[in-house]
């Protein structure tokens, strides 16, 4: 079932029977009633799994109730892409899973082992992306530079403390983003990773993409009964979905970074797809978001069908769900955690 990405401003989401409607007030004109609504979207609730609202979009109480009835998750973002909150169906009653999660949180050996795996996977995925790009552009990246990321991944697997591991991750990420800038085709440029706010188009797309998949991961973890705010690698902090951030590490390069490079290097974006608010920063404009989500869904189908999932063309969410179930078995049954690592070719 699809995820709806709603970005058309000054619209409203409502319910009509068993169908979800997105409407916009039509401009009053000759022969047209003053309150005629233009229907932009009309589909059964049964065909929707997740709704993401960006900016000024109103939702009726009846539509919200029907979404909860159909176990449809709703995520609210401001127009720039900052997650404001989520509405999810009643939480799983799997209290045993949450007890196991809290017990594992007290287990320093488990936290270190789990953290090593997700950081090593992140750095391995980064190395895979760089090496794949080097196959077609050997003049941009030296062999030693590509191999350096693999070295960081190996060091992560043997880190003795979380503090040491975070240092390795930081150094490896700095190395990766230095190379990421070279993988970006002119006229686009990327000097360094910038957040809160992103300072250039490439950073705007990366930040936006991470928030989108982070919200999906958070909802999935919550749905199976895990506490998305109690992580093992990312230190828990008020309002911070630490466990969702833990799982997100495995998917940054395979999903969002790869998608961003494809969009920029295939000239899918123009300068008009980005906006600079008065308070500073750089963000995707409405058309930029449309371009992003169009390619996001296309890439999701290709990616899901290319991996060893049994549910083809179901998007990235099937990968997040599978990873959440692996974590569930790790916590309840003691099975080794297997992070998501890109297949090498």
Image: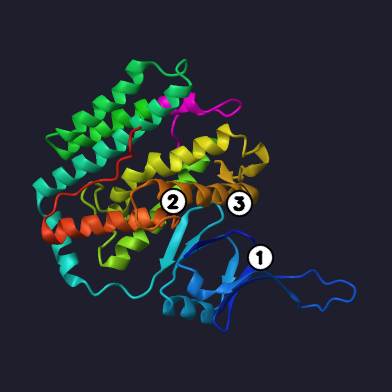
Image: 178 above or below 45 = above
Q: Residue at x 44, y 71 (%)?
A: 72
Look at the numbered disc 2 and give the secondary structure of its residue: helix
User: Which quarter of the rendered picture does the C terminus lie within?
Assistant: top left
- The x, y position of residue 129, in whole percent, is 39, 32
3 or 2: tag closer to the N-terminus: 2
Mark 3 Cα within 10 Å, few/some/many (few <14, many 20+)? some
Looking at the rendered image, the disc whose residue lies closer to the viewer, 3 or 2, is 3
Kindly check if marks 1 and 2 are in contact, taking CB atoms under 8 A apart as contact: no
Looking at the rendering, the stretch of residues picked out in magenta corresponds to 177-196
Distance Cα–Cα, label 1 vs label 3 = 16 Å
Disc on res. 10: 1
Q: Which residue is mark 3?
A: 290
Q: Residue furthest bottom?
A: 17
Main secondary structure type of the part rendered in magenta: loop
Look at the numbered disc 3 and give the secondary structure of its residue: helix
- Quadrant of the rendered structure where residue 164 is? top left
């Amino acid at each position: 079932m699809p995820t709806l990405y709603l970005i058309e401003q000054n619209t409203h989401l409502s319910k009509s029977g068993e169908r979800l409607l997105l409407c916009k007030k039509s401009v009053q004109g000759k022969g047209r009633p003053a309150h005629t609504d233009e229907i932009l979207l009309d589909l059964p609730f049964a065909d929707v799994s997740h709704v993401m609202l960006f900016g000024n979009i109103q939702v009726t109480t009846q539509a919200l109730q029907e979404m909860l009835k159909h176990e449809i998750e709703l995520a609210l973002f401001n127009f720039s892409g900052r997650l404001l909150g989520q509405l999810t169906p009643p939480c799983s009653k799997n209290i045993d899973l949450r007890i196991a999660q809290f017990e594992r949180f007290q287990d320093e050996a488990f936290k270190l082992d789990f953290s090593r795996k997700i950081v090593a996977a992140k750095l391995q995925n980064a190395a895979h992306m760089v090496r794949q790009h080097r196959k077609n552009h050997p003049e941009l990246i030296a062999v030693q530079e590509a191999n350096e990321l693999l070295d960081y991944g190996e060091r992560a697997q043997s880190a003795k403390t979380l503090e040491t591991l975070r240092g390795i991750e930081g150094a490896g990420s700095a190395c990766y983003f230095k190379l990421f800038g070279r993988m970006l085709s002119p006229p686009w440029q990327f000097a360094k990773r910038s957040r809160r706010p992103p300072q250039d188009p490439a950073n705007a797309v990366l930040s936006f993409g991470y928030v989108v998949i982070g919200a999906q991961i958070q909802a999935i973890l919550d749905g199976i009964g895990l506490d998305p705010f109690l992580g093992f690698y990312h230190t828990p902090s008020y309002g911070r979905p630490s466990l969702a951030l833990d799982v997100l590490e495995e998917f940054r390069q395979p999903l969002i970074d790869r998608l961003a490079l494809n969009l920029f290097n295939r000239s899918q974006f123009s300068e008009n797809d980005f906006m600079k608010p008065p308070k500073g920063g750089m963000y995707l404009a409405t058309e930029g978001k449309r371009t992003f989500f169009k390619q996001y869904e296309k890439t999701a189908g290709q990616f899901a069908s290319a991996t060893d999932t049994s549910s083809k063309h179901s998007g990235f969410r099937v990968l997040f769900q599978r990873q959440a179930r692996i974590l569930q078995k790790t916590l309840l049954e003691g099975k080794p955690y297997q992070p998501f690592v890109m297949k090498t070719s």
